Amino acid sequence: MSKPFLIAAQYMPKHDWPRWLLFSFWFWTYVGMIVLVVLLVRWVRYKWFVSVEYVTPARVLFHNEMAAAIQVLEQEESNSAEMDSTVKQLMERIVDRMREIFSLNSADFRAIAIRPDPEDEKDVIFTKMQFGKTDDLSEQQKGIDKDAAKFMLEEKLTTHTKWLRFKEHRPKGNAETVILIRNIGMLRLGLFIAITRADIKIEENWPEFEQSTYLATMLGHVDKLVEVVVNYE
């Protein structure tokens, strides 16, 4: 900016210090304003049009359990009992991680693998692969769980869906919060979770939960694994 200043200074009277000071003051004031405007425009452009928010990649845990399950499923000599056991161990590890994050006891929740109903694309079937407190559920409670799962399945582009304060909407049920983990798109395999304690900090721990259970969203793409869950007794 010194060159424009020197050019303008050639037209100023010699030895007129008051006018020189006034000229210098206003010249650099305008220059400063222009620079600030340019910097502001560049910042806004970067902030809204250029900058891309960094998203931490999901940590895919349970590599060993997943590898063991795939190996057993691919071996021709594996029997159904062995495949059932291996797949259930994998699912248990995912559920256990959920328990650790939310500090849950086995009596505080139920987690049930679900699959689509082949006879009704809008319906779901709760399989017998279940974890937590799943015994002695009334038919009414099972109906409430199924309705909640079907409602959350409408979010086809979401792998993790939560329904907080669920009991306010379904007071006849025993769940305070319901969660659904599933593959994106049409359902192939999902995990329905009902938490029956009201003091669980779901929102606070949700990001960690999403990352730690990310593997569950991919299980529906392993055909043999889905078959094991569907036929689990």
Image (cartoon, rainbow, N blue to C red):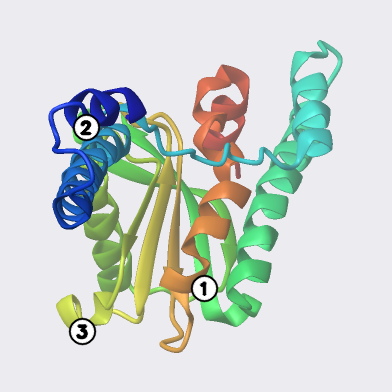
Instruction: Give coordinates of residue 146: x percent, y percent.
Output: 28, 56
Disc 2 on helix, strand or loop? Answer: helix
Compared with residue 65, is residue 168 higher up or lower down, i.e. above or below?
Answer: below
Please, what is the three-letter code of the amino acid marked with disc 1? Answer: Phe
Q: CA distance from mark 1 to mark 3?
A: 17 Å
Please, what is the three-letter code of the amino acid marked with disc 2? Answer: Ala
Compared with residue 227, is residue 216 higher up or lower down, i.e. above or below?
Answer: below
Residue at the spot 52% in from the left edge and 68% down from the top edge: 205
How crowded pointer 1 is (Cα within 10 Å; few <14, some 14-19, many 20+) is rated as: many
Sequence-wise, the earlier of marks 1 and 2 is: 2
Which disc is residue 9 wearing?
Answer: 2
Q: Please name the residue that numbered disc 1 is placed on.
A: 109
Disc 1 on helix, strand or loop? Answer: strand
For residue 162, side relative to residue 190 (left or right): left
Please, what is the three-letter code of the amino acid marked with disc 3? Answer: Pro
Instruction: Give coordinates of residue 112: x percent, y percent.
Output: 49, 55
Q: Please name the residue that numbered disc 3 is placed on.
A: 171
In front: 69, or 155? 155
Disc 3 on helix, strand or loop? Answer: loop
Q: CA distance from mark 1 to mark 2?
A: 80 Å
Instruction: Give coordinates of residue 137: x percent, y percent.
Output: 41, 73
Sequence-wise, the earlier of marks 2 and 3 is: 2
Q: Are marks 1 and 3 in contact (CB under 8 Å)?
A: no
